[in-house]
Image (tube, coloured by chain):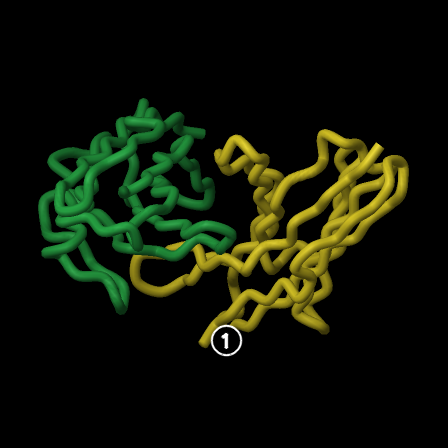
């Protein structure tokens, strides 16, 4: 399976600022996904990152708040914009080229 | 909605007890994949097993075993002789086989194993 390097692993940010999370995969993958995991909750899909086109967002998530880039088949970024304390969560990226799904180690974000 | 339901929010056991985590899924697909992941306190997701809908054989891997029953849409996970290191949140998930083939997760079951 692919291996994903995700960074930063954690951050404490001021409200109103933005944070960009990066995921680098060690091999080319078809699809990349971004999930949010709020404290004590399950994983909720934010969007699917498509190479060469705009990301596809799930209901309740918008591009202005969570802009995503996927410039090539091994790399993607998620930006959490204009942060508020409600954005405090773990953010995880995932990648697949078929039936195996690999996850990054997560970014633990605290907004103060 | 093609949901994944994990009815057990939290389970507490004493070391060496056996424990079963339940997972029930909804699907309209004839072909689908199911998964189990473990999330220890450190936060990363650890892959445990993938099962496709054509393979209803139960699987055993060390202290772990899985019981897949299409007739009841269940994919339950049993840990035999639990250990403190098994303490984690366990997620069941299924692949949605339309569009981008995303994973949909259950709400998770927190397992606490005490010495």
> Measured along the vertical axis of the image, is residue A32 above or below residue A74?
below
What residue appears at the point 51 percent right and 70 percent down from the top-left corner? Answer: B3
Marks counted in the figure total: 1
Coordinates of residue A5 in the picture (x, y in percent): 33, 25
> Measured along the vertical axis of the image, is residue A62 above or below residue A31?
below
Q: Colour of chain B?
A: yellow
What residue appears at the point 30 percent right and 55 percent down from the top-left corner? Answer: A86
Of residues A55 and A80, which is closer to you in this image?
A80
The C terminus of chain B lies in which quarter of the figure?
Answer: top right
Of residues B106 and B58, which is closer to you in this image?
B106
> Measured along the vertical axis of the image, is residue B86 above or below residue A38?
above
Coordinates of residue A83 in the picture (x, y in percent): 19, 48
Which residue has dot 1 on it? B28
Q: Colour of chain A?
A: green
Observer able to see residue A82: yes
> Measured along the vertical axis of the image, is residue A42 above or below residue B61?
below
Name of the residue lying farthest toward the front: A112
Coordinates of residue B106 in the picture (x, y in percent): 54, 60
> In which quarter of the view is residue B96 placed?
bottom left
What residue appears at the point 69 percent right and 61 percent down from the top-left corner? Answer: B8
Give the class, few, some or many, for how many residues have Cα within 10 Å of label 1's Cα (few <14, many ≥20): few
Q: Is residue B26 left or right of residue A1?
A: right
Of residues A9 and A72, which is closer to you in this image?
A9
Helix, strand or loop at mark 1? loop
Coordinates of residue B13 in the picture (x, y in percent): 83, 46
> In which quarter of the view is residue B112 placed?
top right
Q: Is residue B38 left or right of residue B59?
A: left
The N terminus of chain B lies in which quarter of the figure?
Answer: bottom left
Observer able to see residue A97: no
Badge 1: chain ID: B
Q: Is residue B66 left or right of residue A84?
A: right
């Amino acid at each position: 399976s692919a291996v994903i390097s995700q960074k930063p692993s954690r951050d404490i940010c001021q409200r109103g600022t933005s944070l960009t999370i990066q995921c680098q995969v060690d091999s080319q993958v078809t699809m990349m996904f971004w999930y949010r995991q709020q404290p004590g909750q399950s994983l909720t899909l934010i969007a699917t990152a498509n190479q060469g086109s705009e990301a596809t967002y799930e209901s309740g998530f918008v591009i202005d708040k969570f802009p995503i880039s996927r410039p090539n088949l091994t790399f993607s970024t998620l930006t959490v914009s204009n942060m508020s304390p409600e954005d405090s969560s773990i953010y995880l990226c995932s990648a697949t080229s078929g039936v195996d799904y690999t996850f990054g180690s997560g970014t633990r974000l605290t907004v103060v | 909605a093609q949901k994944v339901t994990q009815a057990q929010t939290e389970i507490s056991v004493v070391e060496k007890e056996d424990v079963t985590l339940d997972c029930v899924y909804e699907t309209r697909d004839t072909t689908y994949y199911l998964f189990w992941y473990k999330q220890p306190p450190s936060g990363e997701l650890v892959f445990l097993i993938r099962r496709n809908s054509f393979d209803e054989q139960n699987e055993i891997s060390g202290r772990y075993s899985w019981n897949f029953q299409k007739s009841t849409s269940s994919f339950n996970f049993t840990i035999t002789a639990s250990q403190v290191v098994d303490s984690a949140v366990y997620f069941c998930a299924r692949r949605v086989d339309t569009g981008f083939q995303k994973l949909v997760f259950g709400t998770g079951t927190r397992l606490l194993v005490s010495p």
